[in-house]
Amino acid sequence: MKALLAEATWTPKKQNLNKNLGVVGSLAWKDPQFKIVDKSFPILRHDELLVRVKYCGVCGSDIHVYETDKEGYILFSGPTKLPVVLGHELSGEIVEVGKEVKGFCQGDIITTESILWCGHCTPCRTGMPNQCENVELLGLTVDGGFAEYITLKAKYCWKLNHLQERYSFEEVCKIGTLIEPIGCAYNGIFISGNGFLPGAFAIVYGVGAIGLGAVMLLKAAGAAVVIAVDSIEERLNLAKSMGADYAYNIASTNDFSEMVQEITGGWGADIQVEAAGAAKYTIPMMERNIAKRGKIIYLGRAESEAFIDLNSLVSGAHTIVGSRGHSGYGIFNNVITMIHKGKLCGVEKLVTSSLPFKDILNAFESSRSRKDGKILINMHSV
């Protein structure tokens, strides 16, 4: 079968790094290369599903493996084991069901979590699968979805058949790729961040797929005003079409803090979501715009450290929360249910283009402009 393989040279910046442990990619992997290869057909285990991948989304994490710094190191700052088949935002049809699997049938449409938790370590057993001590990341530390077929443990998979009550088969398969990024936003806002009161003022920094998911979720949960912030006009227009009340381009000469004060009547933002991974630039903006007892939800991985004014944090009783992943807490089920019941209006707009697998590297190049919402790869399109 065909698959996209990412390779790089192991050149650790620090001693005592073990490449088998999935260390931070930007600390070790240099000069990445990408090629479509023929791989052996996956072998189905008793607790797995064999899935014919329909679509797989191009994520910012994939692009951060594709892009490098001045020294040639990949930009992705999370766990990475190379070589690996990239891709973790996928949907597909079940071809075969493992002998020990219950609740799934051949022909089911599914999507999958990409945080592959073990279920045995203390964090997993105490209800924190996103902090699993033995975690693997689909498409980053183990082979992922930019392949014609994939085997997945059934415990990570979720059925999407019932979405056909609202969408066509093709639309369901496309929307299925969005559950993972929207789930990351859900986890940050409602689980790690403990939610917010309806009527709140909200700002989302960075409106890629996760940021756009945050916009939809904030509106669905009752935010009075959502302000989208980005440097790319196309993304800001998309954010407004998906529910953002205001959009601010950071290239603007207008003072953003003045805009926030005017919109909120001098109160500031009750909740701010950072989905840009640009803490060095966004943290100072968020500190200026935060309301009393306001909270900052940090979702994006940053390439550099950022200064935080702890005196302001204490005086304003502010909260800063980091959030990783999308597993557990009913997240996937709740996001799927919201889509099924029409509560995430315009979710299908998040997909801005779909390309055949043969054009995947062109899709990576297009993604570098950051002008798209979500680019999907049709894994069986000619």
Image: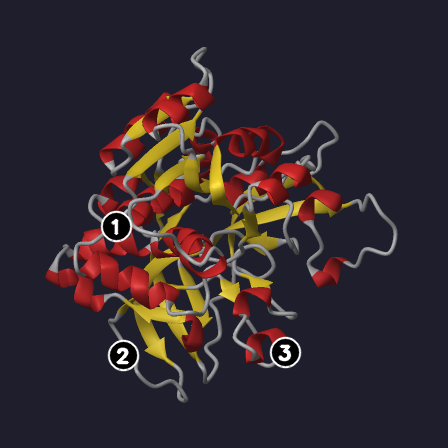
* Residue type marked 1: Ala
Callout 1 crowding tier (Cα within 10 Å): few <14, some 14–19, many ≥20: some
| Amino acid type, callout 2 | Cys
Secondary structure under tag 3 reads: helix
The x and y percentages for residue 312 are 62, 37
Residue, disc 3: 122
Quarter of the image for residue 367 reads top left
Q: Report helix, strand or loop for mark 2.
A: loop
In the image, 120 versus 359, the foreground residue is: 120
Q: Which residue is mark 1?
A: 220
Real-space Cα distance between discs 3 and 1?
34 Å
Q: CA distance from mark 2 to mark 3?
A: 32 Å
Residue 269 visible in the picture: yes
Q: Measured from the top left, where is residue 70 in percent x and y?
A: 71, 27
Q: Quadrant of the C terminus?
A: top left
Q: Earlier in the sequence, mark 2 or mark 1?
A: 2
Along the line of sight, the residue nearer the viewer: 21 or 125: 125
Looking at the image, tell me whether mark 2 or mark 3 is earlier in sequence order.
2
Please indicate, yes or no, whether residue 359 appears anywhere in the rendered image: no
Numbered badge on residue 105: 2
Q: Nearer the viewer, mark 2 or mark 1?
A: 1
Label 2 – label 1 distance at C-alpha: 32 Å
